[in-house]
Image: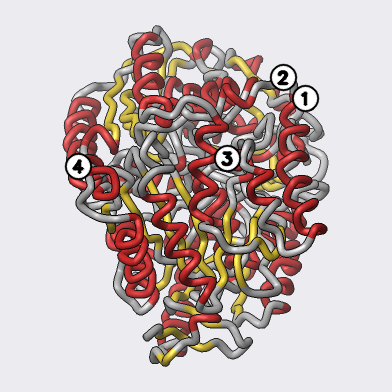
Amino acid sequence: MLTGYRRANGRWGVRNHVLVLPARAAANRAAELIAQAVPDAVAISHEWENSPGDPDSPLVRRTLSGFAANGNVAAVLLVAVDSRDDELAHQIAARGQLVRTLSMNKHRGTIAAAEAGSEAAKRLVEDCVARREPMPLSALVLGLECGGSDGWSGITANPALGIASDRLVAAGATTILGEVPELVGAERFLAARAVTPEVGRRILGLIGDFERSVEALGVDIRGAQPTPGNIAGGLTTIEEKSLGAARKAGTAAVQGTLGYAEAPDGRGLYIMDTPGHDIEQMVGFVAGGCQVVAFTTGRGTPTGSPVAPCVKIATNSHIFERMAGDIDIDAGGVATGTSSLQSAGDAIYEAIIASACGQLTRSELHGHREFAIRRTHYGGAGSKR
Amino acid sequence: MSALAPTVRLRGYERPSGAVGIRNHVLVLPSVVCSTRVARAIAEGSEARWITHQHGCLHVGDDLRHTEDALMGAALNPNVGAVVVVGLGCETVEGGRLARRLAERQQVVDFVGIQAAGGTEAALSAGRAIARDRLAELAATSRTGFGIGRLCVGLDRADDALVEPLVRELTRRGAAVRVASELRGGAAHAQLVRHGAQVIVSLCAANEAPLGCASSPVVAVARDAETFEGLADDFDLAVLGSPVTRDVELLVDRVLDVCLGTPTASERRGAADFVLDRLAVTM
C-alpha cells in the first residue's frame, strides 16, 4: 500500500521536506548557512540573479515556484534580498504552498539573516511534523529519466522501466517522459500513441521545434549527443539513443505534452519539454509535480533531487556492482538471462512504491541534491543588466 | 592618506606560470553539475574552496568552448595554487581532459572521476586525501614581495561614474585594471577571473546584492544608500553619489589592503558564487 503526506492544497507528497530557497544567487550563501544550522531543512542554490529585463525570468520563476510547491515540500523558507523578490514569494503562495519570506535587507546582510532564518527554519520543521497516511496511487506522479546511457539501456533497464510505467498508468498514476533531444528519431512511434490527433501533432511539433532550433544555431547536435560516455558505452547515434530512451515510457497512450516545469492536468503518460541534461530535466520534472523519479544509468550517475527520491536502475550488472553504493536496482539480469523483462519491471515497480513509502534511495543517503534550471534565452542575455 | 605609494610592493604567491597570487587557494572544481555535490563534500570542513555550478554536459558549439574556458579560467587564476578536478566520467566537459589542459598550463592539478573511482564514497575519500595533501603543501609556501605592476584589478561594470576615476587612481598607483565588458554580476566576475584579475571591485547599484567568488576576493561597493543600509554587513564600503577624490583614494586603499591579506565581506561570510553566461541552450 502506498503512503504519503496529504497537503492542505490537495497535493500529496512522499517526503516531508522544509525547503530553504534562495530567491536569487546573492541569497545562496544565507540559504546554505541555514541548512547547515538546521540539518532537517534542505537548501538549494542556483545562478539566477533576478536582474531586471532577464527574458528567462518567467521560466525561472515558474520552475522555482513549482519546485517549491512540490507535494514533497511541506513548507518553504524563501531567502529574499529585498522587495524585488516579492514576485517569487507571491507565485509560491499562489500555488497554495506555505511560504515564509526572510529578507536579507532587514538583517543587514547574510550572516544575521542566516541566524534569523535558522530560527524560522527550525520552527517550520517543528510545525510541519506530519504522519503518513494511505495515499491513492492516482496521486503519484513519476518522472522517467535516463542518464549516462549505454548500449544496454534500450535493451534492459529502459524497457523494464517501461513495464513499471505501464503498470502505474494502468493503476491510475501519472508518469512523465522528458529529454526531447533524446526523442529525436522516436517521434513517430510516440505520436502514434497519442490519445488524439491533436496531441500527436503536438508531440511531432515539440521534437520538430527542437530540431529546427538546433539547426538555427548552426551547430550539429552530434557534437553533444550522444555524449562521450554514451559512445564509450556502445551507443553510436542519437537515433539509437532515442529509440532506447523512449522505451522508458512503455506502451501507454500519451495524454498530452507539457512545457518545462509544467504540471499535467490529468493522469496517465505525458511528455515534458526538457533538455537531455539530467539535472535540468529532473528539476523540471519535480517542478511539474513528480514526487518520485526513476532513473536508469549505464555509466553510473549518482545524482539525485533535493526533495524527491530518485530510484537508480543499472542497465548492466557490471556498473551495479562497481557503483553499488550509488545504484538501487540492477536490471542487468535481463541481458544475462537471470531475469526476464517482466520480473525486472516488477522489481522496479516495487522499488518505486517502497521509496515513495519512505525507504531512502542511494542518492538521498549520499545527500546528492544537484540542481539546475533550464534557460532558453542565450547569448548572455540573462547576465546583462 | 595611505602609506601606499606608486612604488609600493605587495606580497603574494609566485606561480609556475609566472603570475602572482594574493590568495593561496586549493580549488575543488567539478567539471559537471553531476559532480558538484562530491566536489563540495571534498572541500567542506577544510580550507579548500569549491565551486558549485549547473553546467558541463550537453553543450554545443561555442557554448561548449565558452563553458570550458570559464571553468579553466576559475582554475588558472593566480590566486589558485592547486586544483582538484572532480568529474563524473560520461560528461561532455570531460573532467580528465580538463585536468590535462590545466596541467599543460602549468597549474598544479589532481583529478578524481566518480565513475572511475567506483562511486560517491570512493571519490570522496580519494578527493579528501588529495585536498588535504595539497592544502598542506600550499600552507608550507610563503609569500614574497612583488611590484604592484603585476596586480590586475577587475571592475565588474563599465557604466558607473566611479569607473573612470577609479581606473585613473589604480593606474596612477601602478596596477593594471580590467573592466568587464557587456556582462554584469556573477557572469562579469567569471569573465574577470578568467582574465587573471586577482581582486574584483564590484559596484552594486540599487537593489543589487553583493556576490562572492571562489577564486578572487570581491570588494563590494554600495552605490545606493538604501541598499547599503539594508545589506551593510555584506558590503566592504559605500561610495554614495558622485565620487570625490577622497572616496576613490579610500577605495583603492581598501583594495590594496585586501591584496595584503585583509579578508573582504564576501570572504568572511564564505560566499563563492559562480554564474556563467551561456551562449546556447542545453541539449
User: How much space separates mark 2 and mark 4, taking CA atoms?
Assistant: 59 Å
For the residues bearing labels 3 and 1, Cβ distance under 8 angstroms: no
Residue at image point 77% right, 35% down: B244
Disc 4 is placed on an element classified as: helix
Asked where in the image residue A369 lies, by quadrant, the reply is bottom left
Q: Give the class, few, some or many, for how many residues have Cα within 10 Å of label 2's Cα (few <14, many ≥20).
A: some
**Is B185 displayed left or right of A361 in the figure?**
right
- Nearer to us in this view, B208 or A38: A38
- Nearer to us in this view, A322 or B5: A322
**Is A349 displayed left or right of A381 in the figure?**
left
Q: Of the residues tagged 3 and 4, which is closer to the observer?
A: 3
Q: In this view, does B172 lie above or below B270?
A: above
Instruction: Specify the amino acid type for callout 1.
Output: Glu
The N terminus of chain A lies in quadrant: bottom left
Instruction: Specify the amino acid type for callout 2.
Output: Arg
For the residues bearing labels 1 and 2, Cβ distance under 8 angstroms: yes
Residue located beneath label 1 in the image = B164
Residue located beneath label 3 in the image = A182
User: How much space separates mark 2 and mark 3, taking CA atoms?
Assistant: 53 Å
Residue located beneath label 4 in the image = A322
Residue at image point 30% right, 73% down: A359
User: How much space separates mark 4 and mark 1, taking CA atoms?
Assistant: 58 Å
Q: Of the residues tagged 2 and 4, which is closer to the observer?
A: 4
| Chain assignment, label 2 | B
Residue located beneath label 2 in the image = B168
Q: Are marks 3 and 4 on the same chain?
A: yes
Asked where in the image residue A14 lies, by quadrant, the reply is bottom left
